[in-house]
Image (cartoon, rainbow, N blue to C red):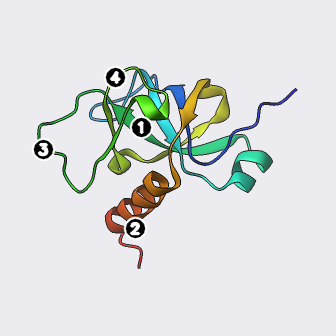
């Protein structure tokens, strides 16, 4: 049975191999692709997270943590948005709030220069 992947979910993803400054390793990531993309293709668009939370969170970062299913405080890094094969998805951890998903959308519009 195929697993169901939904926009707004946090999954552990395997981003190896990575090169140079790309995000890599197994890490949490937010699914941002439309549910129809997730259902009809073998791909998902993700925003990776990092547990290295800076003292000052910039406008390009979104704070997440235990309420989203994570063990540690983390930041979503929309600047590292990427498409992955769904085979890289390892385990669902949780779901972000609608408010957080809207915030991510706003940051993506900013970094991608979408009006």
Regarding mark 1 in the picture, which secondary structure is present there? Answer: strand
Q: Give how far across and how far down residue 48 sits, in percent.
A: 42, 37
Q: CA distance from mark 2 to mark 3?
A: 21 Å
Whether residues under marks 1 and 2 lie with C-beta atoms below 8 angstroms apart, the answer is no
Q: Quadrant of residue 19?
A: top left
- Which comes before the other along the chain, label 4 or label 1? 1
Q: Give how far across and how far down residue 109 sits, in percent.
A: 40, 67
For image coordinates 76% across by 37% down, the residue present is: 4
Residue occupied by mark 1: 48
Of badges 4 and 2, nearer the viewer stands 4
Of badges 3 and 1, nearer the viewer stands 3
Residue occupied by mark 3: 56
Of badges 2 and 3, nearer the viewer stands 3
Of badges 4 and 1, nearer the viewer stands 4
Q: CA distance from mark 4 to mark 1?
A: 14 Å
Q: Can you name the residue that lies furthest to the right here? A: 1
Is residue 32 placed above or below 69 in the rendered structure? below
Q: CA distance from mark 4 to mark 2?
A: 27 Å
Whether residues under marks 4 and 1 lie with C-beta atoms below 8 angstroms apart, the answer is no
Whether residues under marks 4 and 2 lie with C-beta atoms below 8 angstroms apart, the answer is no
Q: Which mark is residue 72?
A: 4
Residue occupied by mark 2: 109
For image coordinates 61% across by 48% down, the residue present is: 7
């Amino acid at each position: 049975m195929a697993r169901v992947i939904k926009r707004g979910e946090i999954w552990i993803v395997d981003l190896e191999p990575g090169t140079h400054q790309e995000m890599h390793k197994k890490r949490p990531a937010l699914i941002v692709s439309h549910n129809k993309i997730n259902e009809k293709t073998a791909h998902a668009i993700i925003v990776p997270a990092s547990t290295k939370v800076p003292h000052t969170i910039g406008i390009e970062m979104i704070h997440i943590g235990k309420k989203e299913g994570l063990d540690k405080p983390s930041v979503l890094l929309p600047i590292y948005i990427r498409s992955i094969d769904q085979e890289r998805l390892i385990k669902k951890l949780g779901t972000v709030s609608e408010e957080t998903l809207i915030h991510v959308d706003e940051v993506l519009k900013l970094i991608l220069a979408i009006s």
